[in-house]
Image: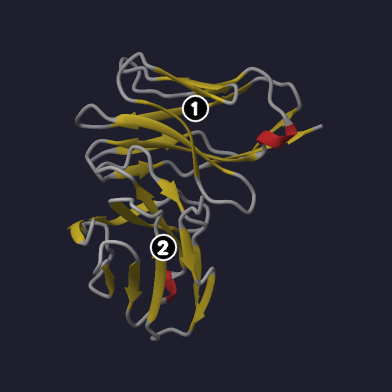
Amino acid sequence: GDSVTQMEGPVTLSEEAFLTINCTYTATGYPSLFWYVQYPGEGLQLLLKATKADDKGSNKGFEATYRKETTSFHLEKGSVQVSDSAVYFCALSDRIAQFYFGTGTSLTVIP
Amino acid sequence: GAGVSQSPRYKVAKRGQDVALRCDPISGHVSLFWYQQALGQGPEFLTYFQNEAQLDKSGLPSDRFFAERPEGSVSTLKIQRTQQEDSAVYLCASSLGYSADTQYFGPGTRLTVL
């Protein structure tokens, strides 16, 4: 069945460091891929998405490229800020309503 | 504008009690989703409504779980005879269209079964 595997945390970085959170997926069809973010005390929010191979999603300085050949959708940011501290979830959707989430990666950015 | 709201935010139940969790989606949103998020895990799909029709309930873990959306707006997730393994955060999300591609999440209800 469909699934998402993402890098385990927690991840701790210094401000302005480069961030990569790995995500790979298994799907029978042609899924859409997503990154969601959950800031402390808040609900899940869509960060970015890509709907087909080679698409790049981007938002707030974060980027992820849909790589069909490696079944990956790694999240990157060139220079993290303290305000990026949150839990990040990779997800895929292969059908109209079915969403599959990874287990989440906790990121802490220290000044 | 108002987002998705859920109530109660926290619920403590004794094992064997029935609970009802409410979700108020964004006004006019056609689709509504329920997820269960165990501690340290990602959300897991429970069920999906399109207006008042429950089109997919494949994620409901047992027949103790029941969801409804009788008028195509507010939804209630009911858990009968709660068990300790039901302890989790229950998330509701809604989307304007017929897919989950752009879904907006509520803050969740944290259920603790003692």
**Where is residue B60 drawn, in percent x and y?**
27, 63
Q: Is residue A67 left or right of residue A37?
A: left
* Percent position of residue B18, x then y: 37, 83
Indicate the chain on which mark 2 is placed: B
Compared to B34, does A111 lie above or below?
A: above
Point out residue A4 in the picture as x, y percentages from the top left corner: 37, 36
**On the picture, is B36 further left or further right than A7?**
left
Look at 59% across and 51% down and name the residue there: A42
Against B97, residue B73 (above or below) is below
Does residue A8 lie above or below B90 as drawn? above
Residue that label 1 marks: A22
Residue at 39% over, 28% down: A24
Q: Nearer the viewer, residue B37 or A50?
A: A50
Which one is nearer the viewer's eye here, A90 or A1? A90
The residue beneath circle 2 is B24
Q: Is residue A96 left or right of residue A11?
A: left
Q: Callout 1: residue from which chain?
A: A
Q: Secondary structure at mark 1?
A: loop
Crowding at label 1, few (<14), some or many (≥20) Cα neighbours within 10 Å? Answer: some
Depth check, mark 1 against mark 2: the one in front is 2
**Which secondary structure, mark 2?**
strand
Quadrant in the picture for residue A55: top left
- The image shows a total of numbered marks equal to 2
Badge 1 and badge 2 in a common chain? no
